[in-house]
């Protein structure tokens, strides 16, 4: 077994114990802490890891250990592999180990979890293609040892194909290590709600939620296949060891359901509670709803730190629907918080402490930075106004030197019909103003010819990508101009990692970090704003944050630029809870209206954004609701009443 990494906390899980495993096996799983009351509700061993990249490293190291152990024994290591954004970091680390540490996969046999149906292996959406591009092409695995379900099998041969797949797994000696992600429905593989514990590899109909989640990859839900081939629950459960990974705020609810909930057929991941060697790897965002994280005082004695005190009292206020200053000793006693009253001496003292602490976080315009150098990093060309349009206006009025750095072009999020509309505009403008009509007509013909021949998911031509980029850049400038800034305040970094023309992006590399570093050296900001909501559908926010951190680390090592204060914002997908926020910035009715007008300037994202996620509302509707809800929660706590409010975490 390998020890947990620093910053990792683990729970044992009801079934995850050494007695449940073969004591002679080298396949012992990751180390687990002794059972304790703090993890009493967790039925799957769960490791909460500080950083996403640490999860990838831990899992990759475990795989490497097994591969080497099997090689010493003179037999193959059989891996069950997953696709999608979840395992990408693991695969990149395995590639690094192969390249730098000599890890050989020559005697590894792999079986992939699933594949869309129908789907040709060379299709850009094919999991067959995904695995070769993201792992197999970069390691020394034998092609004959790679097994991936085929989405191009004729319908009348599917039953035999999946039966042969099961037989191949058995012939290989069974799966030693199975890597999984988890969908919002709790599916593992494509075992959707209703999948039985005894299910085997088969064809399944995809759930509506799953298809909506995949819509971003396919450039529209209507292009997502309705069926898939997948290993069954029983096939997965037969693996000797299982690692399941979940990251981001949007996975927190299903993580809690899988780890703490009853085993039900509607949530396939709950079946993993019966597996003797499963470990759930989650980051802090995905762990947020676990009882030991959200309400640890319900499980065991706790050390009352300041953040925990605030969380407990605000939780009690919401649970009892009582303003903070009106909470009584009886309220505390009935909700297992008597120790908190004992710490302060009375309920009134505890109430007043938290009430004042929350009130001190409210930061109006007069308390915000003035005449400082500020860089706002916006992953996409609308994240700035969506997430921090209110404070951006206040910072402008406070005479700060503002630079809004748009990190990616966002061009894949522009519909083809918008390209046609803008090209048609150019043609008509040329006709009316006697411009070089021949050149514009030639552009139109090339663009229209490409779009007419384009299939869903095809990479746009360079010309079309540029038009889409320019559309988004012009919208971004219009957006910040609404708040008082000018086009001179906008910088378009167009980081290379994004320039694949596909939803799947390259890894952050030295070129991306160099561009961000150059901007920081030029502007020498006192404060930077960075996207802290890491649940965008395609991971761009997370990768942009990685590029910023890489640039700041290099500058720190060189000692040439003073590290700026970092304000993390959210808004497009979630908002910071008031208990986590460092500052709460009130927004008046007029300021919220101006913020929404700035969002409206992003016309290509309005009405029907290409990547809306699971929320049917437009971005401006989400923003309005979240900002008002944050203010309303403070009102429920008994603090001052505001129209709306943005939240920020300062690091």
Image (tube, grey):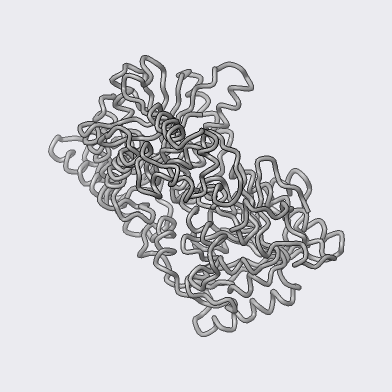
Q: Quadrant of residue 77?
A: bottom right
Q: Position of residue 618 (x, y in %)?
A: 28, 49
The answer to whether residue 531 of the structure is visible from this angle is: no
User: Which residue is located at x 27 percent, y 48 percent?
Assistant: 418
Q: Residue furthest right?
A: 73
Which residue is at the front of the view, 344 or 12? Answer: 344
Residue 641: x %, y % from top left? 27, 34
Which residue sits at x=60%, y=39%? 303
Q: Residue at x 64, y 22 (%)?
A: 557
Question: Who is closer to the viewer here, 504 or 44?
Answer: 44
Image quadrant where one finds the N terminus: bottom right
Please say whether residue 182 is visible from this viewpoint. yes
Left or right of 170, for residue 273: left
Q: Position of residue 451 (x, y in %)?
A: 33, 55
The x, y position of residue 441, in whole percent, is 24, 45
The quadrant holding residue 52 is: top right
Q: Residue at the location (45% across, 26% down)? A: 528
């Amino acid at each position: 077994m390998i020890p947990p990494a620093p910053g990792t906390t683990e729970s044992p899980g009801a079934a995850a114990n050494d007695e449940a495993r073969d004591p002679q096996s080298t396949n012992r799983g990751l180390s687990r802490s002794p059972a304790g009351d703090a993890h009493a509700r967790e039925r799957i061993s769960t490791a909460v890891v500080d950083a996403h990249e640490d999860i990838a490293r831990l899992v990759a190291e475990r795989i490497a250990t097994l591969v080497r152990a099997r090689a010493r024994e003179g037999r193959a290591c059989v891996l069950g592999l997953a696709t999608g954004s979840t395992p990408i970091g693991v695969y990149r680390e395995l590639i690094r180990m192969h390249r730098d540490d000599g890890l050989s996969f020559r005697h590894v046999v792999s079986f992939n979890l699933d594949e869309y149906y129908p789907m040709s292996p060379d299709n850009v959406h094919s999991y067959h293609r995904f695995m070769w591009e993201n792992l197999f092409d970069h390691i020394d695995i034998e092609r004959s040892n790679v097994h991936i379900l085929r989405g191009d099998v004729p319908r009348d041969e599917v039953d035999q194909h999946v039966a042969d797949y099961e037989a191949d797994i058995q012939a290989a000696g069974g799966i030693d290590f199975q890597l999984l992600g988890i969908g919002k429905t709790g599916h593992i593989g494509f075992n959707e709600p209703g999948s039985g514990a005894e299910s085997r590899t088969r064809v399944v109909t995809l759930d509506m939620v799953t298809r909506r989640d995949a819509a971003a990859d396919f450039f529209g839900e209507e292009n997502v296949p309705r069926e898939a081939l997948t290993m069954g629950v029983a096939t997965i459960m037969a693996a000797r060891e299982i690692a399941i990974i979940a990251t981001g705020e949007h996975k927190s609810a299903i993580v809690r359901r899988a780890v703490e909930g009853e085993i039900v057929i509607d949530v396939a991941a709950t079946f993993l509670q019966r597996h003797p060697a499963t470990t759930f790897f989650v980051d802090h965002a995905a762990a947020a709803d676990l009882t030991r994280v959200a309400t640890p005082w319900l499980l065991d004695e706790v050390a009352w730190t300041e953040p925990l005190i605030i969380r407990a009292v605000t939780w009690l206020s919401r649970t009892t629907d009582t303003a903070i200053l009106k909470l009584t000793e009886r309220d505390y006693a009935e909700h297992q918080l008597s120790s908190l009253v004992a710490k302060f001496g009375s309920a009134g003292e505890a109430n007043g402490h938290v009430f004042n602490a929350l009130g001190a976080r409210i930061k109006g315009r007069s308390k915000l930075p003035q005449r400082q150098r500020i860089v706002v990093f916006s992953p996409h060309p609308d994240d700035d106004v969506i997430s921090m349009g209110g404070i951006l206006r206040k910072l402008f009025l406070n005479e700060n030197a503002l630079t809004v750095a748009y990190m990616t072009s966002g061009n894949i999020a522009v519909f083809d019909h918008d390209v046609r509309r803008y090209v048609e505009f150019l043609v008509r403008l040329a006709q009316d103003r006697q411009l070089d009509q021949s050149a514009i007509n030639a552009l139109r013909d090339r663009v229209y010819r490409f779009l007419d021949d384009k299939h869903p998911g095809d990479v746009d031509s360079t010309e079309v990508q540029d038009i889409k980029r320019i559309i988004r850049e012009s919208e971004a400038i219009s957006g910040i101009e609404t708040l008082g800034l000018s086009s001179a305040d906008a910088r378009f970094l167009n980081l290379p990692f994004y320039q694949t023309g596909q939803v799947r992006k390259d890894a952050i590399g030295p070129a991306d970090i160099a561009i961000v570093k150059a901007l920081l050296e030029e502007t020498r900001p006192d404060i930077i704003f960075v996207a802290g909501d890491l649940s965008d559908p395609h991971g761009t926010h997370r990768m942009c944050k990685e590029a910023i951190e890489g640039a700041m680390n290099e500058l720190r090592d060189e000692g040439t630029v003073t590290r700026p204060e970092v304000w993390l914002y959210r808004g497009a997908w979630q908002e910071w809870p008031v208990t986590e926020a460092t500052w709460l910035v009130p927004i008046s009715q007029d300021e919220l209206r101006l913020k929404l007008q700035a969002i409206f300037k992003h016309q290509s994202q309005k009405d029907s954004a290409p990547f809306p996620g699971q929320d049917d509302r437009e971005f401006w509707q989400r923003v309005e609701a979240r900002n008002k809800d944050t203010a309303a929660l403070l009102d429920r706590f008994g603090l001052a009443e505001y129209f709306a409010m943005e939240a920020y975490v300062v690091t």
